[in-house]
């Protein structure tokens, strides 16, 4: 079969410079905001006409930091503790025949900027900073929402399970508009789901800060927040 070439039309800019800590699905932390900036050839305002009428969008993107050579028919979903293998097509693993991701995000604004042209401000994205975007499509509730659908082994969201303890003095350096998103990400429990060591100190990068924390039971305690640079 002939190869199909796809070129990025945009890149997304988020608060995640590393994969650790990124929510496991889009929409789990609505307070997260990101900006989709288009390549120069796709900045014609006509291409965005009518987009403001939609509340949500599908982002089709490239798992650019999850490259493997060869095909593995099974993977170990973190949701199952990393101990059970399932077929790759029954999971949302990044290690796929074609490394394509799909995320549903809330459209907050179509900002028309003098430097970058139309920029999409979105909420709830689960993408690494700089991720290439292949395409954007509007979310259609009548076609895309199926309340009766079966969700298999991931039928229920993991949920924000943890109580986050973060002293105000530690949180103070974080800009006020970033704090709800940071606390929401921590509440989702960024740790690998097969790790449960209350003595371990974890580090997570977020919005230019290094966040250190421990988890014991259902409580996450922030130990330190400092700028990375």
Image (tube, grey):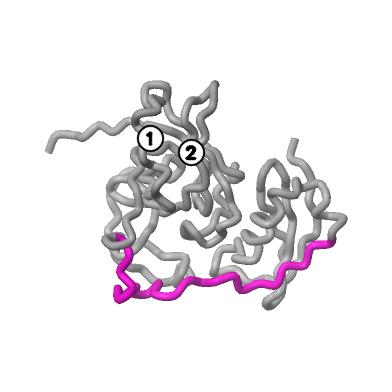
Query: Which quadrant holds the N terminus?
Result: top left
| Segment colored magenta | 144-167
Nearest to the observer: residue 199 or residue 227: 227
| The one of 35 and 211 positioned closer to us in this rendering | 35
Badge 1 density bin: few <14, some 14–19, many ≥20, Cα 10 Å: some
Q: Residue at x 32, y 56 (%)?
A: 140
Camera-side residue of 136 and 198: 136
Instruction: Residue 68: tell me if it is visible.
Output: no
Asked if the stretch drawn in magenta spans residue 152, the answer is yes
Q: Which residue is mark 2?
A: 110
The residue that appears at 87% across and 55% down in the rendered structure is 169
User: Of label 1 and label 2, which has the lower sequence position?
Assistant: 1
Q: Quadrant of residue 61?
A: top left
Which mark, residue 48?
1
State the image coordinates of residue 50 (x, y, percent, origin top left).
Answer: 36, 40
Q: Is residue 130 above or below residue 181?
A: above
Q: Position of residue 157 (x, y in %)?
A: 47, 71
Q: Is residue 13 left or right of residue 91?
A: right
Q: Tell me: 42 left or right of 221.
A: left
Where on the picture, by quarter, is residue 67? Answer: top left
**Residues tagged 1 and 2 counted as in contact (Cβ below 8 A):** yes
Magenta stretch: dominant secondary structure: loop
Q: Is residue 23 left or right of residue 184?
A: left
């Amino acid at each position: 079969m002939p190869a199909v070439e796809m070129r990025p039309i945009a890149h997304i800019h988020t608060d995640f410079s590393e994969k650790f800590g990124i929510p496991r699905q889009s929409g789990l932390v609505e307070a997260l905001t990101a900006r989709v900036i288009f390549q120069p050839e796709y900045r014609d305002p006509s291409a965005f006409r009518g987009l403001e009428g939609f509340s949500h969008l599908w982002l089709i993107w490239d798992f650019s930091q999850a490259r493997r050579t060869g095909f593995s028919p099974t993977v170990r979903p973190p949701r199952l503790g990393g101990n059970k293998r399932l077929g790759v097509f029954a999971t949302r693993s990044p290690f796929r025949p074609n490394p394509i991701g799909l995320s549903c995000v809330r459209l907050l604004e179509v900002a028309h900027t003098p430097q970058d042209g139309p920029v999409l401000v979105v909420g709830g994205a689960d993408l690494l900073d700089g991720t290439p975007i292949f395409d954007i499509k509007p979310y259609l509730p009548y076609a895309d929402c199926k309340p009766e659908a079966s969700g298999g082994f991931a039928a229920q969201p993991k949920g924000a399970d943890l109580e986050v303890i973060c002293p105000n003095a530690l949180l103070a350096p974080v800009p006020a508009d970033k704090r709800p998103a940071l606390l929401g990400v921590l509440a989702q429990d960024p740790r690998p789901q097969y790790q449960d060591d209350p003595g371990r100190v974890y580090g997570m990068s977020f919005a230019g800060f290094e966040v250190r924390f421990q988890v014991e039971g259902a409580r996450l305690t922030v130990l330190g927040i400092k700028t990375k640079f």
